[in-house]
Amino acid sequence: MARGRLLVVVALLGPLLSLRSAGATPPQLAAPTNLSARAVPSGVVLSWTPPPWATASTTYAVTASPPGPTCAALGKRTCTAAMQTLRLERFVVTATAPSGSRVTSLPSAVVTPELVVVVAGQSNATGEASYAVDPITKVSTFASPFTNAADTKDGIELWKFGPAAHFGTGFAGLDTPQRMATPLGVQQVFGPEIGLARGLMADRHLRLTIVKVTYPGSTIAAWLPTRPQGLFPTLIGQVGAAEHVLIERGIVPVLGGVVFFQGESDALDPNLAPNYSRDLSAFTAGLRQTFGSELPLVLLEESSALDIAVQRTANQCLPQGCDAEAASDAEVRGADAALAASLNHVALVDSAGLPRVSPWVHLSNVGERVIGREAATALEAMLPPS
């Protein structure tokens, strides 16, 4: 599996920049501002806003540490430096005018990277039937023996997802379950984000912020980038909002990928399933146009197999018939598999066979923990070393 890239958004460092004179540099010369960086497989792309006096002849030299990769540019505002890991503690930019005058920014603040991963999709991405306290065992997923350091170190940014019956918005600790109105009353629920965060913490000791944007019952068409009032712009806006909060806290957000759990509604409708491949491709293209062409994407593949089997056993197939429903399910699953096979930096994790609860398309809390952990493993394979 090819390695993906991360988008590193470094906190705006304007207030941290000041002038250092070199030679006969006039004191009124301004330094470059708004330093930022994004990692690519070959290194790190460093960017800045040129000072007002800059021209096409202005040269720039960038030094980053550790281990101290450098790069240079002529009349540009970016350059690429070799970097073997995602660690980028600080860097400076020196601008040189044609006259030889130089202005160097003070070193940036020490970078504290925090991985940002988006969890998006419909009911199984929400955790529609994944109760934090198991209805049978009465054991909480947010208590021993399930917890690890992610529960107290990681955070989650919740969009107020779905209908009014679903509760939860804003920043919270990962150990804060979402609340949802259910047939059993208001319940605490969670989606694949718990297993995902705990897996990344256990394997890579990575701090993580989850940006969770889900809408139960949504179809893939609701996520199309071409729908101005759809879920796609909501997703993009929430990522930006989360990054802004982290930057204000002095943390550098590192966009590590998107985990997408979608397709049950389309698989249940023979009229929608044929469009799934086209619309999923459009959604993916929109993500990569916004966040970069190598953004890691983990597709959590839906499965209606158990639901169909239960319907057959009870002779209660939906009006279109179980055969038609099975064909639609296969069409949606095939679209996921085809996309993963045709694009780099896309991983597929199959939910078929995981524990579910009635109405049998929804994963149980056990199923959500398992698929989240598998998503972590898939994402790790597309991340550069930390």
Image (spheres, rainbow, N blue to C red):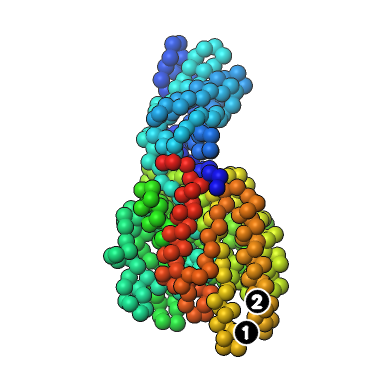
Question: On the rendered structure, is 279 left or right of 118?
Answer: right
Residue 239 appears in the rendering: no
| Residue drawn at point x = 40 percent, y = 52 percent | 200
| Residue drawn at point x = 50 percent, y = 58 percent | 119
Q: How many marks?
A: 2
The image position of residue 281, as x and y in percent, is 66, 56
Residue 199 appears in the rendering: yes
> For the residues marked 1 and 2, what is the alpha-carbon distance in whole angstroms?
9 Å
| Residue drawn at point x = 37 percent, y = 70 percent | 132
Q: Is residue 120 above or below residue 30?
A: below
Quarter placement of the C terminus = top left
Q: Which of these two is toward me, 343 or 44?
A: 343
Question: On the rendered structure, is 370 left or right of 280?
Answer: left
The image position of residue 305, as x and y in percent, is 57, 74
Task: Give the residue number, with chain letter if any, for mark 2.
Answer: 325
Tag 1 near tag 2, CB within 8 Å: yes
Type of the residue with mark 1:
Cys
Secondary element type, mark 2: helix
Q: Is residue 182 above or below residue 4?
A: below
Type of the residue with mark 2:
Glu
Q: Indicate which disc, 1 or 2, sits on the residue closer to the N terminus.
A: 1
Secondary element type, mark 1: loop
Query: Badge 1 local density, few (<14 within 10 Å), some, or many (20+)?
Result: some
Task: Give the residue number, with chain letter if any, for mark 1.
Answer: 317
- Please tell me the numbered disc located at residue 91: none
The image position of residue 138, as x and y in percent, is 32, 76
